[in-house]
Image: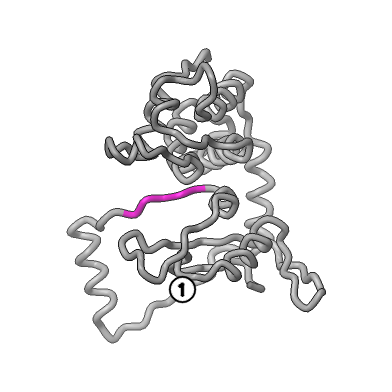
Amino acid sequence: MFTNLLLADELNRTPPKTQAALLEAMQEKTVSYAGVTHELPRPFFVLATQNPLEQAGTYPLPEAQLDRFLLHVRVDYPSEAEERDIIEQTTGAKSAQVPQVMRGEDVLALQARVREVHLGADLLDWITRLVRASRPLPGALPEIQQFVKWGAGPRAGQSLVLAAKARALLHGRFAATREDVVALAAPVLRHRLLLSFAAEAEQKSADDVVGVLLRGVPFAG
């Protein structure tokens, strides 16, 4: 745990006790052992993969832990050119060189700069309404009431704002736009939506639900 970047491969193979420890690390940035709480180094963030196929020997990730991940990125098969490069680079004798490109202090400074990126009141209102519209409450969109068992919480709105600001900064802009929100709506929301049996029966995915939200919640900007 005591590292800046923690890579957890096939996280859904870890037992619940390990997942609980990881939840504390991600939320509190601490590790508790034998009655003593230890601070984790800063910056600290987690990259994790899940095995999407096998069910034997896996443990479903708790919703509370999933909510701590900023993004859920779907990784599809590589392109032909990418796959050729993978095969070539991993079957030869040449060893990879990994140069340092950034220090921890640089990452912390960039994280602070992201929070300074402008996001207008119209975008903030829209993000708030998108998140609230994901909940199957009275008056919700018909598809949400049909396909969603449990919607996204306030952490989803926080994550969507910060992700949109970060994307704007990566594109050389100091103001987030509607396009930033649209581009990141699915990665931010797809792991925070609990779908109903009706969605499974009709083969509806979380991304389908996000599309319903983007089409059904108007942007007034």
Q: Is residue 13 left or right of residue 30?
A: left
The x, y position of residue 166, in whole percent, is 55, 42
Report the number of numbered marks: 1
Out of 34 and 83, give the one closest to the viewer: 34
Q: Judge whether 124 appears above or below 8 on screen.
A: above
Out of 91 and 216, give the one closest to the viewer: 216
Q: Is residue 100 left or right of residue 76?
A: right
Q: Which residues are magenta?
A: 71-75
Q: Quadrant of residue 137?
A: top right
Q: Residue furthest top?
A: 220
Mark 1 residue crowding within 10 angstroms, few (<14) / some (14–19) / many (20+):
few
- Where does label 1 land, which residue? 98
The x, y position of residue 43, in whole percent, is 66, 61
Give the amino acid at mark 1: Val
Q: Quadrant of residue 197?
A: top left
Q: Is residue 57 left or right of residue 20?
A: left
Identify the residue at horizontal 75%, vertical 76% (top origin): 33
Out of 101 and 19, give the one closest to the viewer: 19
SS for callout 1: loop
The x, y position of residue 128, in whole percent, is 59, 26
Identify the residue at horizontal 52%, vertical 25% (top origin): 133
Q: Residue furthest bottom?
A: 93
Magenta portion: prevailing SS class:
loop
Is 197 magenta? The answer is no
